[in-house]
Each structure stands twice: as structure tokens, then as C-alpha cells.
Image (spheres, rainbow, N blue to C red):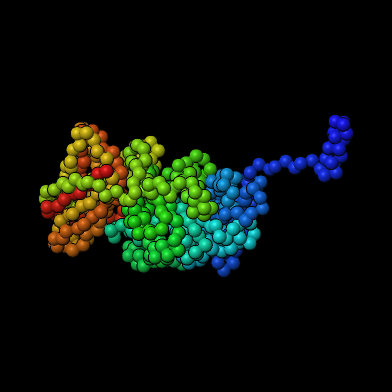
Amino acid sequence: MRRSLVLVLVLLTTLLGAPAAVAAPGHQISYKTIPGVGGTALKAFVVEPTGQGNGPFPLLVMPSSWAVPNIEYVGAAAKLAKESGYVVVSYTSRGFWDSGGEIDIAGPDTVGDVSKVIDWAIANAHADGTKVGAAGISYGAGQSLLAAANDKRIKAAAALSTWTDLARSLYPNNTVNKQAVEVLLGAGHATGRPGPVLLEAEDAYRDGRFWEVVPISAGRSAVSKIDQINANGTAVMLGNAWNDGIFAPGQIADFYGKLTGPKRLMLSPGDHATAELFGAAGLPNEIWESVGRWFDRYVKGTANGIDAEQPVQLKPNNGGTWKKFGAWPTGTTDTVQLDGKRIHAGWATVADSGTILLSGALQGFLNIPTGVSLPFVDRNVAGVWGGPQYPRGATLAGTPKLKLQVTPSAEITTLFAYLYEVGPLGLGALITHKPVKVTGAGRTQTLDVELEPTVWNVGSGNRLALVIDTVDPRYLTESTRGSTVTFGPSSLTVPKA
């Protein structure tokens, strides 16, 4: 009897075939040409899940950063496809590398390309048009936010090292961020084909007419599209670095406050694109881990608890664990009265904001701050004020503010305010800074100046110090040598957690 049963099983196996092995979840990568706006060829890596059925699969679209090709996100894309079943399209933004077209600084064609890629993926890559997300770093992040305003199919966006206000980023308080502009222009020429808008903007910058560039900012800034994003109900995750030398965090914090849909804000040590750099390559990274969970919740609809977490997550710029808040921190404050001083303008001091990309990276990776020796700051050409001392230490959290009474002797003067933590030997670590342009020779005026926001742990026994001078190598300085600046009674307000 047993022998007959074995023979029957062997016969059935022969007739029906052996049970097929179940394929383990994985991914496949192909290189495609996708037609963008006007048929412009966009070169893309298309990463699709395998061993997870025939789809349709949720879709993530990732435009590349400025001057970076489409390989930028392939590591993260492979991980998302294999582990979470996404189709991911990582493509080179128009005007760069092997994609066609010209660089239009996130203009209508570049933003429209995101929707064209969504269309293509639905038709050609088993993508689900009802489950779509957009993500990117830097230029790709800005495109993702702008596309989310235009395309209701985008349920969630993750924007890392992004801008939300282009003019405020590159022209803070009417002061040109010279190092950032030069880096962007140089990289654009080296890796792409600048279009008319970029070439005209460069001409204005070279001729000292940067204010003529400002009008193009509005349509290329997500803050001007906030009503559309809110109306669409897009779930928006923002992740930037405290020391981002191109897109400083103040504009991000303000934009976050205007969002009414699901939202998350993560600010951490580092410079432009450094905090999330390794995550894009598929390596362990807490920012990209949150990106994956964000999309799982708001694209796939997985109840993973991220919506129940405190949405504002801030890691101190000088080290420490994440501090989590329900909203942007508005705790207690210390206010310091600043006495009057008179300085000569147009001369550099040992106080400055550091070098973009380098200084912030040193702070983020090695906790090496931009430093100063306070005794060596020339009091003839800089105002120096002592701030509060903290015998037991303190955590600053939020936006330090200045109410500054000034009387310049020249028609145009650029001021640079630096807030330091200072130890017993007078050595200071730069906490935050901000430039401001002052106009009106001989006119006394009161300025309300917000420094860039920060979270910073002040060591026990250390104090704060404020330095204001008139030259900084990061920025285009318009101060006149031989002129003066007189500071009247002023104040510094510092927020604490």
C-alpha cells in the first residue's frame, strides 16, 4: 500500500511538475530614456521590485540634485524596491549630464518633468498612479515640493537639503551669498547646459545687479505654492542641516510652520547634503530611514506609527541626541541689553562664518566648529558684547533675535552678526550667524534681525558672546572702508529649551 502511494505521488509530480520555488524579494535595475516636457529626453535608472507579484507597485520619483547624475539615488532606490516594494525612478534633471534640454533653475519645464516621469512609470513600469511619492536632495528636493503643488497624484514628498525660498537662501537680508552662488554657477557650467534664465541671472550677478534676479524666485519657491500644497493635502517631510551653506534652515522652519497637512521636520548637524549623503547610497542613515517610513505611511498607507511621533525632531548642532517637539520650539528666553559702540567699517576680523560645504561638514562629522579667539577680535572694527553665562550649562533651541539700533555713515553697509559659545580662555565656537544690509547714510534706524535657528548645548560655566563686523568672505560685502557704524542701545534675545 505504501509503495503504491509513493508511485502515485511520483506520477503526479511527473505530470504536474515540481512545486516552483518562491522567489525571494529583490529588485531589478534598467536604464531608460523617458520623454519629459516637450519630448526632452530624460535619462533614468528605473528600479523595480522582483519576487513581489506583478504589481501595480507604489511609485517614488527622484529627480537628481544640481550637477549630479541619475546614479545619485540608486542605492536607496534598490533598498526601497527590495524591502518595501516600490518602483523608483531616479533620473537626471533636464539640462545636466546625459539628459536633454537646458537648465531652467527649477522652472516650469523642469517641474513638469516630474509629472511626465509619473505618466511614463504608470504606463511602462507597473507603477500605481494612486500611490505616488516624490523625493530628492537639494535641486531634486525643490523640484519635488514644486511638483507636489502642481500634481495631485503626489501623496507625499520628502525634501532634503532643500530650499523653500530661493531669494531668501541666496540673498539673505539683501546680501549675496557669494560662495553659494559661485559654487552653483561653476557646477552648472561644468556639468550642464545653462538656459537663458540662468545666463541672465549670472550676468546680473557679475554686474552687481543681483536684485534683478529676485523676481524669478517666487515661481521657483515652494513657499509661494503653499496654498496648493495644503489644498492637495500632501504629506511633507523636510530634512536640512543647521550649517547648510546654500539653503540655511530659517526658511525651512518658517515653511514648515505654514504647512497644514501631515508634516515632519528634521534638522541635524552638517552642511549642504551631508546629513543624508550616505543614505542616498543605500547605507544606514537615520534621515533616509525616516524617508522610507514617511512614504510607507503616506504613499502605501501602512500604519507604522510615524504619524503619532513628535513631528519636529532636532539634533543639537554640537552633538547629542535628538530632541523632539510637537511644534517649532518656543520656550523661555534670555534677553541681554547691548550697550552703544562705534566701529570702523570695511575691515575684516578673525570672526567669520566659515566656508560653505567645508565648515558645516567639519561640524557635522567631527564636531569641529568654526572658531574664534575673542581676545583677537579687533574692537576698532567690530562690536563685541558679552552674553549670559550658564554655570550649569543650557540648551539653546530656536531662533536668536537682535533688535539693533544702528547709524551708518555710508549709504550702504553690510553687517555680519555672529553668536558664539565662549569658554574661560576666550575661545569661541560659532553657534549661528546672519548678514544684514543697512542703507541710509547718517540715518538712525532700528533693525529686527533673526539669526539662523539652532539647537546648541552650552557647556557648564561657558557664556555667550555676540560679535558684529562688516566683512565676511562667504558673502558679497558692500561696506566702505573709512566709513563708520554707530550702535545705539540694542538687545539680543536667546531662546532656550
Is 280 or 472 nearer to us in this picture? 280
Left or right of 245 in this view: 106: right
- Extreme residue in the front direction: 1
Query: Is residue 291 shown left or right of residue 496?
Result: right
Image location of residue 331, percent across then percent down? 25, 47
* Residue 344 visible, this angle: yes
Q: Residue at (85%, 30%) from the top-left corner?
A: 2
Q: Nearer the viewer, residue 104 or 57?
A: 57
Q: Which residue occupies 21% across, 59% down?
A: 438
Horizontal and vertical percent for residue 432? 28, 46
Specify the farthest residue to the top.
2
- Which percent across, then down, holds residue 213? 37, 65
Q: Is residue 129 left or right of residue 9?
A: left
Q: Is residue 449 left or right of residue 358?
A: left
User: Residue at point 47% right, 41% down?
Assistant: 285
Number of labelled discs? 0
- Identify the image quadrant of residue 122: bottom right
Can you say which quadrant of the picture contains the C terminus? top left
Q: Residue at x 47, y 61 (%)?
A: 148
Query: Residue 205, percent across and down?
Result: 36, 62
Q: Quadrant of the N terminus?
A: top right
Task: Look at the image and tell me whether residue 221 can be seen.
Answer: no
